[in-house]
Amino acid sequence: MTDLSTADAPRTGNRQYHIALERGDLAEYVLLVGDPGRVAKVAAHWDGIELERSNREITTATGTYHGMRISCMSTGMGTDNVEIVLAEVMEITDAPTFIRVGSSGALQPEISIGDLIISIGAVRLENTTDYYVHPGYPAIAHRDVVWALEAACRDLGHRFHVGLTATASGFYAPQGRAMRTLPVRYPELAEELRRQGVANLEMESSALFVLAGLAGLRSGTICAAYAQRVDGTFLEGAEKEAAEARCIEAGLSGIHLLWAIDADEGADPHARWSGLIGRQGRGQPSQPGGIN
């Protein structure tokens, strides 16, 4: 029987308590998704799978993709779940790179449903990260991951935007959604964020950016716009599946680009960006808040 009363993080044998993984099970390049069902959709692009495991809402696959060892994990919804997953992953890896492949609601009118949005940082509208840092501490994506995701979208020809994301602690009142039976404290939240230039609203990225940053790790987020909060439209059916597929494709391409640069031993990764992007016809990264 495992003793959970100690101050140390709980384990089940050699495995981390919630993710049910131990050292060696995960790659150092990890895609994070919310929906457990999305893990299989990511892994369907791989050349091979060496591990598949599910525990609670956390489903994990590890395999190979164009020469890179890669993992994909579901976190479920919310920053509290992201905190658990990241804390345990960091215990059994050395220096992982994380890219979240998710969904979000667009806040700016020029963002069409189905577009992809790359986060440069997140407004912390949740309190999970308050247990790690001061409320004024910024949640920032790593610049290498932002560049890699931009390059991937350009190379793939996917319409994308780059800007700030807001991370809420829930889906309904925490995102200002009106409800029939429950009060909403901040019904104008989405409009206020739109006026402040925030690109999209979701539920995970701020925890990812803060925790990865504190640990000195790279992280970033790319989301498909499943909803447009300005006009109230939603993606459904085949169009939603197509947007999800584009987001997965960009996430895989972006993390593979980071792996390829990392694998070039002795090279200055930042000095290589312009030449590498130019050779692949991707152009230069856009300015934050831009559209491509």
Image: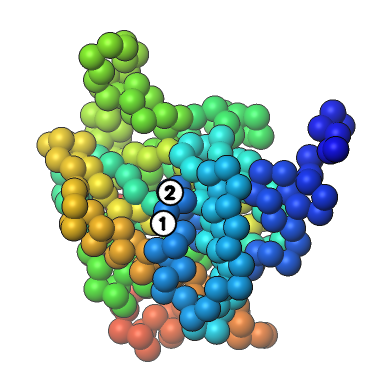
Q: Helix, strand or loop at disc 2?
A: loop
**At 23% from the left edge and 29% from the top edge, which residue is drawn?**
191
Residue 280 can be seen in this image: yes
**At 36% from the left edge and 69% from the top edge, which residue is drawn?**
249
> Within 10 angstroms of label 1, few (less than 14), some, or many (20 or more) residues?
many
Residue 123 can be seen in this image: no
Quarter of the image with the C terminus in it: bottom left
Residue 145 % position (x, y): 48, 63
Residue 223 % position (x, y): 35, 53
Of all residues, the one furthest to the front in this rendering is: 1
Left or right of 87: which side holds 275?
left
**At 31% from the left edge and 12% from the top edge, which residue is drawn?**
182
For label 1, the residue is 38
For label 2, the residue is 35
Mark 1 residue type:
Arg
Left or right of 72: which side holds 16?
right
Residue 162 % position (x, y): 33, 56
274 or 34: nearer the eye? 34
Residue 22 % position (x, y): 74, 58
Quarter of the image with the N terminus in it: top right
Image height of 186 relative to 61, above or below? above
The image quarter containing residue 200 is top left
33 or 160: nearer the eye? 33
Left or right of 39: which side holds 240?
left
Cα separation, mark 1 vs mark 2, equals 5 Å
278 or 180: nearer the eye? 180
Mark 2 residue type:
Asp
Tag 1 and tag 2, C-beta contact below 8 Å: yes
The type of colouring in the image is rainbow
> Within 10 angstroms of label 2, few (less than 14), some, or many (20 or more) residues?
some
The number of discs equals 2
Q: Helix, strand or loop at disc 1?
A: helix
